[in-house]
Amino acid sequence: MNNYSKQIELLFTSEIQFRLASAVRLAVTLEKQPLDLPVEWTYGKHMVKYNEVALRKDQATYASTCLHRSATFLMAVAIKDVIKSIIHNPKNHSDANIRNAYQIARLIRNAFAHGPFHPVWSIDSDCQDAIFEVKDIITLNTKGLQGTPFDWRHYGGPLALLKLCQFVRFEILKDTNTKPGDRKIPKPKTVCYQQGDLILEEIKKLPSRFRKKNHKET
């Protein structure tokens, strides 16, 4: 396996991990994600019982959000590492998309690495008050961000990082595999639409508790 193939595989791994975390978070929200764990689990010299590792629903909801956030930021880690491994001095590359993709991923990685559960921006002095953009994919304006809490609005959110990951994989590394939008896969069992964190589920008929009951006059 050559270096490019290896880096493509690393990016794809981070991408499908994000996709799985997205599916888990959706399933937990819709109360369709099983929360079963082994009644007894041994690994090496350690053993735990079910009551030691079982999750309550509220814990699963919180954990699925954290899992999704971690999977999102791990894409930035992978992007930064991959670009650095194949391109000499990416911070000063002549191609603005490569340069900006690297800087965005690096700055997000820095915030995440130093505070994975509560990231805070740590912007290098030479990157402050600057705009980094990969056209039509992601934009990071660092003006006033130094030392402030991380917010998805600063960089466009998880889908912006997913698109950046795919951009690096297909446009920079020239992955020859089928692009995600061109795949033919089975339709989902549950039809949902999501806007930000708002989830809308398509239903065939109203649940019985919402149906109007017929009352006979007496």
Image: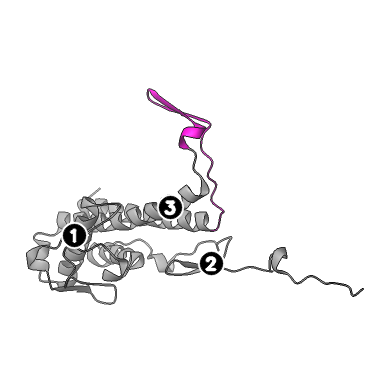
- Asked if the residues shown at circle 3 and circle 1 are in contact, with their CB atoms under 8 angstroms apart, the answer is no
Residue 105 location, x and y as percent?
22, 61
Residue 165 location, x and y as percent?
29, 62
Which label's residue is closer to the chain start, 3 or 1? 3
Image position of 208 (left or right of 104): right
Which label's residue is closer to the chain start, 1 or 2? 1
Instruction: Give the residue number, with chain letter if any, for mark 1.
Output: 106
- Asked if the residues shown at circle 1 and circle 2 are in contact, with their CB atoms under 8 angstroms apart, the answer is no
Which label's residue is closer to the chain start, 3 or 2? 3
Depth check, front residue: 176 or 87: 87
Q: Quadrant of residue 131?
A: bottom left
Farthest-out residue, front: 218
Residue type at mark 2: give it.
Cys
Instruction: Give the residue number, with chain letter if any, for mark 3.
Output: 62
Q: Quadrant of the C terminus?
A: bottom right
Q: Marks 1 and 2, Cα distance to the nearest angstrom?
A: 33 Å
Whether residue 40 appears in magenta in the rendering, the answer is: yes
Residue 206 location, x and y as percent?
68, 68
Magenta range is: 30-53
Instruction: Give the residue number, with chain letter if any, for mark 2.
Output: 192
Whether residue 212 appears in magenta in the rendering, the answer is: no
Q: Marks 3 and 1, Cα distance to the nearest angstrom?
A: 27 Å
Q: How many callouts does the rendering have?
A: 3
Mark 2: few, some, or many residues within 10 Å (few <14, many ≥20)? Answer: few
- Mark nearest the camera among 3 and 1 is 3
Q: Marks 3 and 2, Cα distance to the nearest angstrom?
A: 21 Å
Secondary structure beneath dot 2 equals strand
